[in-house]
Amino acid sequence: MIFHVNRLTYKTDVSPEERKRGMDLLRNQGESIPAVQSYVVGPDLGGDFELGAVFVIANLDDYWDYLIHPAHFLSEKSGLNLVQRFEAFDVTDSADPEIGAKIARLHARSYEENPEIAKLVADVPSFTVPDGTSANV
């Protein structure tokens, strides 16, 4: 099982309506991506981010399906330009010692196959991917 966690803070000039739209786009991922078994989207309580989302995914094949799903692309295309700071990380019960590297390769492959998304990611002032590195690709 993989818990894929996203945390973000919007730019200061982002309107309340745009913030709500971003939250709605994240919720849409949970509702419409078949690979997502459950999810939660809401305020990042106790952290130094504004918003958090957790998507529960069964395995690496489903993780890939999540990354390439149109609802995920829509969130990225419509929301990354509003983000000041973004962090993604994963929590897993997998015994595979290589799972972190495998997840990082899925993200790298996604950016390679989708240069438009890679450009949006590169333009976010602070963007950290699950392996803990900066994703200014």
Image (spheres, rainbow, N blue to C red):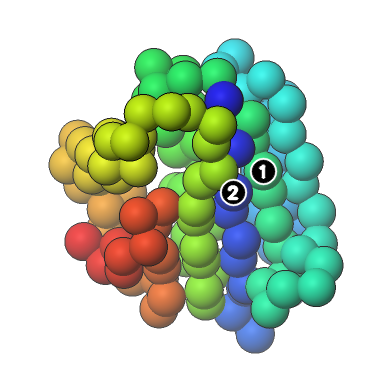
Q: Which residue is mark 2?
A: 5
- Neighbours of disc 2 within 10 Å: few (<14), some (14-19), many (20+): some
Residue 7 appears in which quarter of the rendering?
Answer: bottom right
Q: Earlier in the sequence, mark 1 or mark 2?
A: 2
Q: Is residue 91 visible?
A: yes
Q: Is residue 81 left or right of residue 54?
A: left
Disc 1 target residue: 54
Which residue is found at the position 32% from the left and 49% from the top? Answer: 117
In front here: 78 or 3? 3
SS category of the residue bearing label 1: strand
What amino acid is at disc 2?
Val
Q: Residues within 10 Å of mark 1 (few under 14, many from 20)?
A: many
Q: Give the residue drawn at x 41%, y 52%.
A: 130
Q: Is residue 62 left or right of residue 100?
A: right
* Amino acid of disc 1: Val
- In the rendering, at what x and y percent does residue 54 appear? 67, 43
Q: Quadrant of the C terminus?
A: bottom left
